[in-house]
Image: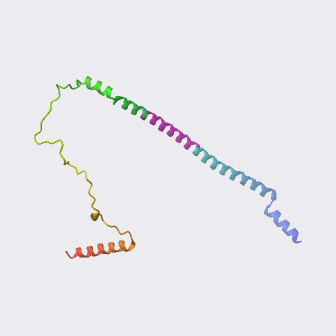
Amino acid sequence: MTQNRIRHALERSGWRPQRQAAWLVILGVVLTLIFGGAYLTQIANFATMNREIEGLIGQRDRLERENEAYRAQIAEFQTVPRLLQQAEALGFRPATSADIEYLVVNGYNPNRSETVVSLVIEDDLDETPQYDATFRGWLAQQWDNLREQFASFGR
């Protein structure tokens, strides 16, 4: 009698093993489609990003080649024969000995011993600051700063 009750309760509730299996298969297919779509979206984004990066790398290489061509062109324009040609085109000509004027400056000694800037490097080791990179040194520095602040309040 007990078995009949259980069988009767299961038949009334509509519990069918075939129906559950079908729902599990449908759920598996839906989850597979969702995860597959997410995976394909990631792969598409990755491929798009790679194409953009390749394009930017190609553009960088092209710009580097153009810059090198410009540098070569600038170097060609800065050669001495080219500059001499440009100077002659502007009306300049090479100086001859008749074109050079020498000036005498009174009091000027080309063999003087003094220069504007001292050539001797003076080592003043006594004037270099001494750093105490210990905690005690830092703490003493902070204490001195605090005392100076309080001392400046009364002034």
Q: Magenta stretch: give its range.
A: 47-67
Q: Name the quadrant of the C terminus.
A: bottom left
Pick the quarter of the image with the N terminus: bottom right
Side of 131 relative to 18 (left or right): left
What kind of secondary structure does the magenta stretch mostly adopt? helix
Asked if the magenta segment contains residue 51, the reply would be yes
Which residue does the image show at 37% across and 32% down from the upper left? 75
Give the percent coordinates (x, y) of residue 46. 58, 45
Image quadrant assignment for residue 78? top left
Name the residue: 68% across, 53% down: 31
Q: Inspect the magenta stretch and tell me whether residue 153 lies in it.
A: no
Quarter holding residue 109: top left
Q: Nearer the viewer, residue 132 or 20?
A: 132
Who's the residue at 27% across and 65% down the image?
126
Question: From the viewer's perspective, is residue 59 above or below residue 20?
Answer: above
The spot of residue 44 in percent (x, y) is 60, 44
Q: How is the image coloured?
A: rainbow
Could you tell me residue 65's position as x and y percent?
46, 34
- The image shows residue 93 at horizontal and vertical percentages of 23, 24
